[in-house]
Image (cartoon, grey):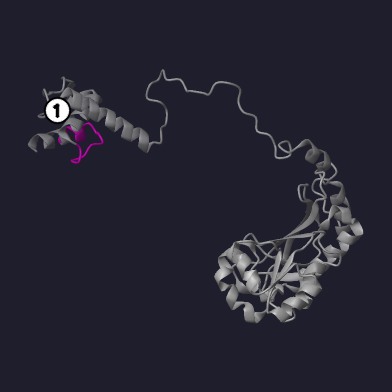
Amino acid sequence: MAKKAELLEQAAKLKLEVSAKNTIAEIEAAIAAAGTKADKKSGEPVAEHKADTAKAGKRSAKAIEQAEEKAEKEAKKAAHDTTPADPEAVESKKKGPAPKTRSKLLRRGKNYRKVAELIEAGKVYTLAEALELATKTNPSKMDASVEIHVRLGVDPRQADQNIRSTVVLPHGTGKKVRVAVFAAETDAAKATKAGADIAGDEEFTKLLDKGEINFDVLVATPAYMPKLGKYARLLGPKGLMPNPKSGTVATDVEKAVKEAKAGKVEYRVDKQAIVHLSVGKVSFGTAKLQDNARAFFGSLQSQKPSSLKGVFIKSTAISTTMGPGITIENQVN
């Protein structure tokens, strides 16, 4: 310890940044690097002598060299210096030309790019203009659906702001809706006359036991809802579990079937606070699509939460199934 104290005293005279935490080998290496060694008696700097080294241990030449390298690495790390240790090192680069990043539009198909040119960038269209343009911007050969996407200013995590409702579209959705009814035999007979595709009690449960789902909408009476509890894992993920809010839990099954067949659809806000709904097919034409869209916006207006302090509708867009989006004026205040 006496030698370490002497070395620390010499280091202090040379104004070196070392402390008692450093080893004797590290202190000696720091003094040697300074180029001079203080005279113990007079304190005057004299010519440097080669540091005493041992054959092995912390005072060996190898240990001192490793200590110097470690100290240098720590200093570079503290200074966030990432330059390579070898001055002759060359930065490695991948061979070949640099990859070119294309825009999202250029990554689309040629049909999509062609119809996208019909939409003026940054323009906000009226509902009639957007629907007419949507029928012209269908890039696929199929009779695509025309969809409305509304971004709301609600918080779906709040129970009173979790928007969920149904609306009867005047001209339907253009899709054939298969309706199933789970009720007593008397109600099942009425549902069959109203146009239900599947209706019954025990026969219906047998189909569910097999995992067969050959319907798009399931209607059940309140008395038969407890029997569907065991099938919640089968029906729930597919959105087929009857719910009073969607009108699929009803005592008048005949009326529920007629509404479902006539074009009654359910919409609800997702986790990103967006409502998506198909309001018909491209083949409907602008007039029928506009009637369906106005029916939806009227229903959405009635769902505005009373506790909402900010704006209800942030933005609205219309598009076909595979077509580009068209920004429209907000139809709901």
**Hey, which quadrant is residue 46 in on the image?**
top left
Name the element at disc 1. Answer: loop
**Type of the residue with mark 1:** Arg
- Residue reaching furthest left? 2
Res 170 visible: yes
- List x then y, in percent, for residue 176: 79, 60
- Left or right, 47 with respect to 260, comes to left
The quadrant of the image that shows the C terminus is bottom right
Res 305 visible: no
- List x then y, in percent, for residue 1: 9, 38
- Left or right, 231 with respect to 39, comes to right
Q: Is residue 262 above or below residue 151?
A: below
Q: Is residue 48 magenta?
A: no
Q: Residue at x 75, y 37 (%)?
A: 109
- Left or right, 77 with respect to 227, comes to left
Q: Residue at x 57, y 68 (%)?
A: 232
- List x then y, in percent, for residue 231: 57, 68
Q: Main secondary structure of the magenta part?
A: loop
Of 203 and 45, the residue lying toward us: 203
Neighbor class of circle 1 (other Cα within 10 Å; few <14, some 14-19, many 20+) is many
Q: Residue at x 42, y 28 (%)?
A: 83
Give the residue number, with chain letter if any, for mark 1: 59
Q: Is residue 20 magenta?
A: yes
Q: Is residue 51 above or below residue 250?
A: above
Q: Which residues are magenta?
A: 9-22
**Hey, which quadrant is residue 61 in on the image?**
top left
- Residue reaching furthest top? 88
Of 47 and 255, the residue lying toward us: 255
**Hey, which quadrant is residue 147 in on the image?**
bottom right
